Image (cartoon, rainbow, N blue to C red):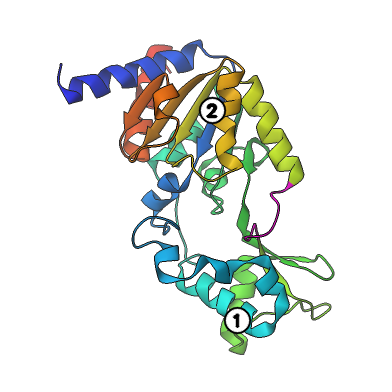
């Protein structure tokens, strides 16, 4: 059997597992976002090959304005404020929800693209936050990121300030040194422990505590599917392992699911 035949068989196996399963959790990492043109953090050529990740800590952000100025520079030059669109992997997961086969998406990504593709916001658990929002650390007022970007452009400021209290503004994402949002983390653990099929897509499964989710699923008896270009620490424990681009693989799987369900 050729590698192409092997992959086609694996795609069919995953499609059959989706149809049989009653509680499905999808877990997405940077490999899903990169197909929309969003830069990766850890891969060669990624954000951390151009900037020191320790410049992106919460302590440094709070410590002084020069640190904040550097971090806002990283955000601007890292491509986080550009207009991006969902790719086939996002649309495949939205379709999976539409078919009534998806409990939730647990994501390490901060780009809001699952919601933009059509997944119900309440079913998207964002472990690392969402770059669509900026929050004031003093009065907790929230701003849409687009409004703050416009403020920076119109004023020429390097570091934005809260228009109400003059407080420190920070993207509503998790910086180094910050804890993950408790309610989101707790819900992710519960969904992982109660699913019968866990599909990890585009993640190295190396960044904890997010990477614990597939292990929780396995320990509770769920089947694990891993779709990724590179290797992961859980490859040997996966029921199905498919190496390939997230968009292409997920599109083919959902196509097979739709054919089998005649929808």
Q: Position of residue 12 (x, y in %)?
A: 33, 17
Question: Closer to the camera, 91 or 127?
Answer: 127
Q: Is residue 185 something that shows in the picture?
A: yes
Mark 2 sits on what residue?
98
Question: Closer to the camera, 263 or 42?
Answer: 42
Q: Position of residue 244 (x, y in %)?
A: 30, 36
Residue 222 picture quarter:
top right
Q: Secondary structure at mark 2?
A: helix
User: In the rendered image, which quarter contains the N terminus?
Assistant: top left
Residue at point 36% right, 15% down?
13
Disc on the earlier residue, 2 or 1:
1
Q: What stretch of residues is rendered in magenta?
A: 173-181
The kind of secondary structure the magenta stretch mainly shows is loop
Q: Secondary structure at mark 1?
A: helix
User: In the rendered image, which quarter contains the C terminus?
Assistant: top left
Q: Residues within 10 Å of mark 1 (few under 14, many from 20)?
A: some
Residue at point 26% right, 24% down?
7
Q: Which mark is residue 69?
A: 1
Q: Say left or right for 32 vs 122.
A: left
Residue at point 71% right, 41% down?
184
Q: Say left or right for 196 vs 203.
A: right
Residue 175 picture quarter:
bottom right
In the rendered image, the residue lying farthest to the bottom is 156
Q: Is residue 151 something that shows in the picture?
A: no
Q: Position of residue 253 (x, y in %)?
A: 37, 25
Q: Say left or right for 247 vs 71.
A: left
Q: Position of residue 128 (x, y in %)?
A: 62, 51
CA gap, disc 2 to disc 1?
43 Å
Q: Which mark is residue 169?
A: none
Q: Residues within 10 Å of mark 2 (few under 14, many from 20)?
A: few
Question: Closer to the camera, 80 or 230?
Answer: 230
Using the image, determine if residue 141 lies above or below residue 240: below
């Amino acid at each position: 059997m050729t590698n192409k035949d092997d992959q086609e068989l694996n795609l069919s196996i995953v499609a059959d597992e989706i149809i049989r399963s009653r509680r499905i959790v999808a877990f997405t990492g940077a490999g899903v976002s990169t197909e929309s043109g969003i830069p990766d953090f850890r891969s060669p050529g990624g954000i951390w090959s151009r900037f020191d990740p320790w410049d992106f800590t919460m302590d440094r952000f709070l410590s002084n304005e020069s640190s904040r100025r550097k971090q806002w520079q990283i955000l601007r030059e890292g491509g986080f404020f550009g207009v991006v669109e969902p790719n086939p992997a996002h649309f495949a997961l939205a379709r999976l929800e539409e078919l009534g086969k998806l409990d939730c998406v647990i994501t390490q990504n901060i780009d809001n693209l699952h919601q933009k593709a059509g997944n119900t916001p309440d079913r998207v658990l964002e472990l690392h936050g969402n770059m669509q929002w900026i929050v004031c650390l003093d009065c907790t007022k929230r701003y849409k990121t687009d409004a703050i970007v416009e403020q920076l452009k119109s004023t020429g400021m390097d570091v934005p300030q809260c228009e109400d209290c003059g407080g420190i503004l920070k993207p509503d994402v998790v910086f180094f040194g910050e804890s993950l949002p408790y309610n989101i983390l707790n819900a992710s653990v519960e969904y992982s422990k109660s699913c019968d099929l866990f599909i990890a897509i585009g993640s190295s499964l190396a960044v904890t505590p997010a990477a614990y989710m597939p292990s929780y699923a396995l320990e509770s008896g769920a089947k694990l599917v891993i779709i990724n270009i590179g290797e992961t620490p859980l490859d040997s424990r996966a029921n199905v392992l498919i190496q390939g681009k997230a968009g292409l693989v997920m599109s083919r799987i959902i196509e097979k699911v739709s054919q089998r369900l005649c929808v």
